[in-house]
Image (spheres, rainbow, N blue to C red):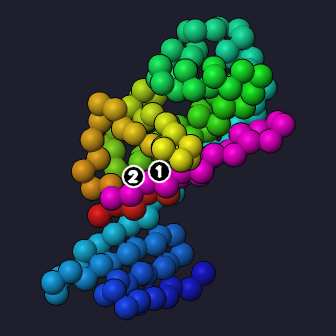
Amino acid sequence: MKEFIIQNNENEVIYFSKSRIYNFKCIKGRAINMRVLCGTDIIEIERIKKSIEHSGERFTNLVYTPAEKEYCESRRAAKYYHYAGRFAAKEAIFKAVSALLKNKFDISWHNAQVINDENGNPAVEFVGIKFENIKNIDISISHCHEYAVANVVILVE
């Protein structure tokens, strides 16, 4: 991919290169550097199901917050799809925010919580950890019979 630049009418410049996307927004004559960070993960639903059936609450308490467990359990017969989707989402979040961490162990499973907004769409909440420079997070979770996948896009100033 070649490098190229797009400028729109709101004094915003987006720079695309081979490995990065930068967004520069001009406010009062100064450019603000915005970066886009992405993370994706895919997991076999059966793998999560076996982990939960084998170790039960040990596994779910380690990986999921009480709100996440309540949501997944409310899905009854489809609960393993939702547990797997939340697992993939957390992994995708970790991949996206890793560029903002000094040490990858600075974040734990319970620091990233996947909730549903007022419209039922998945959303990310950080608990016990702050990322002051994150301006926006978009998350998408999907699953089929065998796999769950999640994609996270973070806009960072």
In the rendered image, is residue 80 in sight?
A: no
- Does residue 121 appear in this view? yes
Q: Nearer the viewer, residue 46 or 113?
A: 113
Residue 34 in the image, given as x and y percentages of width and height: 33, 69
Q: Amino acid at mark 1?
A: Ala
The kind of residue tagged 2 is Ala
Rendered image quadrant of residue 74: top right
Which residue is painted at 77% across and 39% down in the image?
A: 147
Residue numbers of the magenta segment: 135-152
Residue 96 is marked as 1
Q: Nearer the viewer, residue 104 or 82?
A: 82
Answer with left or right where residue 127 lies relative to residue 147.
Answer: left
The quarter of the rendered structure image containing the N terminus is bottom right
5 shown above or below 117: below
Q: Quadrant of residue 10?
A: bottom left
| Percent of width and height locating residue 45 | 75, 30
- Which of the image's four quarters has the C terminus? bottom left
- Residues under numbered marks 2 and 1 in contact, where contact means CB atoms less than 8 Å apart: yes
Labels in figure, total: 2
Label 1 residue SS:
helix
Q: Main secondary structure of the magenta part?
A: strand
